[in-house]
């Protein structure tokens, strides 16, 4: 079933709890500047740094086997929860540093008063809002080779399988040690390259989560490879594995409205050439195809007037509303950095 933006308010409460957002990603000019205009933007103070109110936060850090990379995982547990409490639903969020900047105390109080999910922010152990180079490696299942602004061929990505192993074998067990988790209510949210990771996870390990929320996924990656053999194999071999999928896309993304671009800038030209690997409406079309797959319940939601960047906070706020029944704050502009 596909639900358009004009019908979203009339969706049944049950259907509105489903989750995976899928959209076209406006990704990097190069791995070092992936998918944001200011790759050096810092996190600043977030709810993770504030005194515990409705949620208490703790964190752990994981090293890669070669000790060259470090992931910082923040876990939010409802303050009223205890080891003997009813198992709680859990939301795993990619780009955890950026995701933490979206939440505020009012949203946390609303969550605690409703479904009271455990919140898991999977980020990197630094003060960057978005760690472009790290996420480009971790969130992509395909190697992308493209010319940069100097016409030099560059290859990047391909680390998604190892990153999914990290989530399944190291992050999930540690979260379950710290909180009582309902293993039948596990959700995964990601935006842009994170949204692409959500899609590849659905394709390769559909039983890893029950709710998949993919916002603005970079379906153009590696000349549109995510729309190729892996999708076809998943559709052919899913064998009715149940999953709930929500596809979210900004209206300006679907229409290809990328605003004013300086076409004399070689970086801009290289960027636009790179994202030509998929049509602007590829995410909407993907949702249509997935809706025909036995076992999948698919919802598509479009956000009129929103481009790629604003979709990160809007999609996360909408996801919290859909999954856990809180007020939908997706129309509230994000605070200025």
Image (cartoon, rainbow, N blue to C red):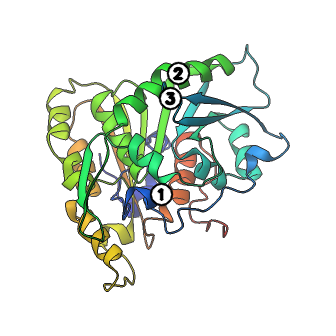
Residue under the point 79% across and 31% down: 79
Inter-mark Cα distance, 3 to 1: 44 Å
Earlier along the polypeptide chain: callout 3 or callout 1?
1
Which residue lies most toward the top here? 84
Q: Nearer the viewer, mark 3 or mark 1?
A: 3
Residue 252 spot, x, y in % from top left: 37, 72
Mark 3 crowd level (few <14, some 14–19, many ≥20, 10 Å Cα): few
Mark 2 crowd level (few <14, some 14–19, many ≥20, 10 Å Cα): few
Residue 289 spot, x, y in % from top left: 20, 46
Mark 1 crowd level (few <14, some 14–19, many ≥20, 10 Å Cα): few
Examine the rendering and report whether any part of residue 82 can be seen.
yes
Left or right, 80 with reference to 238: right
Please identify the quadrant where the N terminus is shown.
top left
Earlier along the polypeptide chain: callout 1 or callout 2?
1
Examine the rendering and report whether any part of residue 278 can be seen.
no
Q: Which residue has dot 1 on it?
A: 9
Quarter of the view holding residue 234: top left
Earlier along the polypeptide chain: callout 2 or callout 3?
3
Vertical relation: 40 (above or below) 246: below
Q: Nearer the viewer, mark 1 or mark 2?
A: 2
Tell which of 149 and 59 is nearer to you: 149
Q: Which residue has dot 2 on it?
A: 170
Vertical relation: 264 (above or below) 86: below
Q: Which residue has dot 3 on it?
A: 64
Please identify the quadrant where the C terminus is shown.
bottom right
For label 1, the SS is helix
For label 3, the SS is loop
């Amino acid at each position: 079933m596909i639900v358009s933006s004009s019908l979203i308010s009339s969706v049944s409460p049950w259907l509105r709890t489903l989750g995976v957002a899928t959209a076209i990603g406006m990704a990097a000019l190069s791995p070092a500047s992936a998918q944001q205009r200011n790759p050096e933007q810092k996190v600043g103070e977030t709810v993770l740094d504030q005194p515990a109110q409705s949620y208490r936060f703790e964190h752990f850090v994981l090293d890669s086997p070669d000790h060259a990379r470090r992931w910082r995982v923040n876990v939010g547990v409802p303050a009223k929860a205890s080891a003997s409490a009813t198992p709680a639903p859990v939301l795993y969020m990619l780009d955890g540093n950026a995701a933490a900047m979206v939440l505020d105390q009012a949203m946390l109080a609303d969550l605690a008063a409703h479904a009271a999910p455990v919140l898991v922010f999977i980020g990197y152990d630094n003060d960057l809002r978005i760690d472009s180079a790290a996420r480009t490696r971790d969130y992509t299942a395909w190697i992308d080779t493209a010319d940069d602004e100097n016409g030099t061929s560059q290859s990047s990505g391909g680390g998604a399988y190892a990153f999914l192993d990290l989530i399944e074998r190291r992050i999930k067990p540690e979260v379950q040690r710290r909180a009582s988790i309902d293993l039948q209510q596990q959700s995964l949210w990601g935006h842009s390259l994170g949204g692409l990771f959500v899609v590849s996870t659905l394709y390769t390990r559909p039983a890893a989560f029950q709710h998949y929320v993919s916002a603005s996924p970079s379906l153009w990656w590696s000349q549109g490879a995510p729309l190729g053999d892996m999708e076809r194999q998943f559709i052919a071999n899913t064998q009715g594995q149940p999953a709930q999928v929500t596809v979210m896309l900004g209206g300006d993304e679907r229409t290809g409205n990328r605003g004013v671009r300086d076409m004399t800038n070689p970086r801009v030209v290289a960027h636009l050439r790179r994202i030509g690997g998929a049509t602007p409406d590829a995410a909407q079309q993907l949702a249509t195809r997935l809706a025909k797959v036995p076992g999948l319940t698919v919802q598509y939601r479009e956000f009129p007037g929103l481009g790629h960047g604003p979709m990160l906070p809007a999609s996360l706020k909408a996801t919290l509303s859909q999954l856990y029944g809180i007020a939908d704050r997706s129309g509230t502009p994000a605070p200025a950095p």
